[in-house]
Structure formats: structure tokens, C-alpha cells
Image: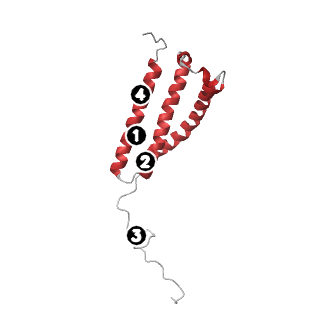
Amino acid sequence: MTSSETPAAKTVATSYDRPAALSLPRTPRRSNTNNFEMWAWLFMRISGLLLIFLVIGHISIMLLLDDGVHRINFAFVAGRWASPFWQFWDLSMLWLAQLHGGNGLRTVINDYARKDSTRFWLQTLLAISIVLITVLGTYVIFTFDPNITG
């Protein structure tokens, strides 16, 4: 060997072609069966597209058609929620917005909370608020009574 040649790396005396400094893996690699983050990513894309459709429809009905904001009152909402179609529309918008926003905020908490205990408490508060708002909103949509007699 001349001085211009570099020596080849010393290898382990096995069939593996790896430098001697790298030891064999301690445990065999397992495939990750928990694909939660992949499904959360996919949910964000699909729910985002659905929310665009639902929100544009909501804004069109509430603000752009007929008299716009000036016609929105108790009677308008009561008439709208008398139809199962509009109940389902608003319920879908509520659930998708809560889950989409909650998943986005969960991602932000995971990215920026430095301590595990902080991350735990922030995610616990987030989950409680999502469940509370979703349950109360669903309750209002399904139990809304247009007859407000004293």
C-alpha cells in the first residue's frame, strides 16, 4: 500500500458488510403498527376539504342570499333547524371543525411543549374542551325548541 491510498475500513468477520465500529442491532426492527399520525394527517386533508364546502355553503346561506345578516334572528334559526338536512349540515360542520381544529392544536402542542408534563396537561385540557363544546353543540342542535312560550 502506498501513501496515497487510503486503508479500507476494518469489517466484522461475518457476512455483514459493515464497519467494525457498528455493532449488530440489539433487537430486530419491528414494523410500526401504530399509524395514528398517518391517519391524523389524512383526516386533516379530508376534513379540510369538507369544511371548505360546508363553510362556503354556510356563509352563502347566512350572509349572501336574500337580505344577508339583517334576516338572521331566532325565527330564521328555528325555521332552519326544523329541517333535518340543516341540522345534519350544522352538526357536520360542528364536529369536523372541532376535530380538525383539535387535531391541529394537538400537533402544535406536540411540537412546542418541551416538558412531558406540560404536554400532558395541555392535551388533557384540549381534549376536555373539545368534548365539552362538541357535546354541548350537539345537544343544542338536537334539542332546540322553536316554541319559546313562558
Q: Which residue is mark 2?
A: 109
Cβ–Cβ under 8 Å for marks 3 and 2 = no
Of 5 and 120, which appears nearest the observer?
120
Tell which circle, 3 or 4, labels the residue nearer the N-terminal end: 3
| Colouring style | secondary structure
Q: Which residue is mark 4?
A: 135
Mark identifier at residue 126: 1
Residue in the picture at 50% in, 30% down: 94
Cβ–Cβ under 8 Å for marks 1 and 4 = no
Cβ–Cβ under 8 Å for marks 1 and 2 = yes
Mark identifier at residue 53: none
Kind of residue indicated by mark 3: Leu
Mark 1 residue element: helix
Tell which circle, 2 or 4, labels the residue nearer the N-terminal end: 2
Cβ–Cβ under 8 Å for marks 3 and 4 = no
Label 2 to label 4, Cα distance in Å?
Answer: 23 Å
Mark 2 residue element: helix
Q: Residue furthest top?
A: 149
Label 1 to label 2, Cα distance in Å?
Answer: 10 Å
Kind of residue indicated by mark 4: Val
In the drawing, does residue 25 fall left or right of residue 105? left
In the drawing, does residue 93 fall left or right of residue 57? left
Kind of residue indicated by mark 2: Ile
Q: Which residue is mark 3?
A: 22
